Image (tube, rainbow, N blue to C red):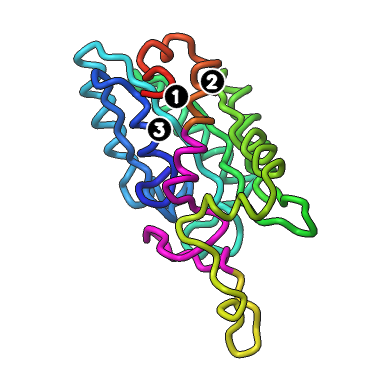
Amino acid sequence: MATKSGYGDALCARFKPEVDCVNLARGGRSSGSFRAEGLWNRVQELLSQSAASGISTYVLIQFGHNDQPGKPGRSTDLVTEFPVNMTRYVNEVKQWGGVPVLLTPLTRRSFRNGVLENNLKPWADAIEVVAQQTQTVLLPLNAESHAAVQAMGEAEADTLAVAPPPPPAAKVESGVAVDPNKIEPQGAAKSAFDRTHVGVKGAAFFANMVEGQLRRQIDVISRFLRAAGE
């Protein structure tokens, strides 16, 4: 969702001018580190202000990518930590007068022998359980984005990245193949090719997907979204 590496700003652009759409996402944060760094405090501040003014506020919550193992300072345990974190986010939004909306994590775009991997599905499944237990609106972004990227194929999917794929010669350093998906500095907007973050084309593509899910899941939001083509 983060600015310059996700679809959040493109989604905000789909709302009419009378809507304040605030993108508070930060790259490289997990469901644990986002709170630990104090970033969640801004959500509480905004919800307190909108509640005092009688303004309806929806909070879209998507985590998973940085909760996966192998990311020091960010990883969370899928069984004992991640669901607890997600449930706490939902409960606090409700407590502060907002409406939480859970999203399953956007698919990565790594293919193997023509088949798109989905190593985020366990996190998507965990979010679905939290949504059921807390009776929270759920946008199944993981499933829809995975199906869409599988259908378009690897070559087209690579055009959704921040930068074009490097030439074959650039993929090897010291005789060892470089996996661009593992080059993921915390908090930095992506400037090189990978199959996780998105550029302008990818942001527009997935923002449209989330917009469609919002229209289907939350009727009242449709009146605040721009018409197609605007």
Numbered tag placed on residue 11 in the rendering:
3
Say which amino acid is labelled 3.
Answer: Leu
The percent coordinates of residue 124 (x first, y second) are: 64, 38
Callout 2 touching callout 3 (CB < 8 Å): no
* Residue 197 is one of the magenta-drawn residues: yes
Depth check: 208 or 146 in front?
A: 208
Q: CA distance from mark 1 to mark 2?
A: 7 Å
Residue drawn at the location 46% of the way across and 49% of the way down: 32
Q: Nearer the viewer, mark 2 or mark 3?
A: 3
Q: Residue at x 64, y 33 (%)?
A: 144
Which residue is the extreme one toward the front? 229
Q: Of the numbered discs in the image, which one, if any, rests on residue 137?
A: 2
Is disc 1 in contact with disc 3, using a CB cutoff of under 8 Å? Answer: no
Relative image position of residue 117 (x, y in whole percent): 72, 52
State if disc 2 and disc 1 touch (CB < 8 Å).
yes
Q: Disc 1 and disc 3: Cα gap in Å?
A: 17 Å
Tell me the number on the disc at residue 100: 1
SS under mark 2 = strand
Amino acid found under the numbered disc labelled 2: Val
Tell which of 4 and 227 is nearer to you. Answer: 227
Residue 22 makes an appearance in the image: yes
Q: Earlier in the sequence, mark 2 or mark 3?
A: 3
Q: Earlier in the sequence, mark 1 or mark 3?
A: 3
Q: Which residues are magenta?
A: 180-207
Residue 206: mark in rendering: none
| Left or right for 185, reference 111 | left
Q: Nearer the viewer, mark 1 or mark 3?
A: 3
Instruction: Report the front residue among 7 and 29.
Output: 7
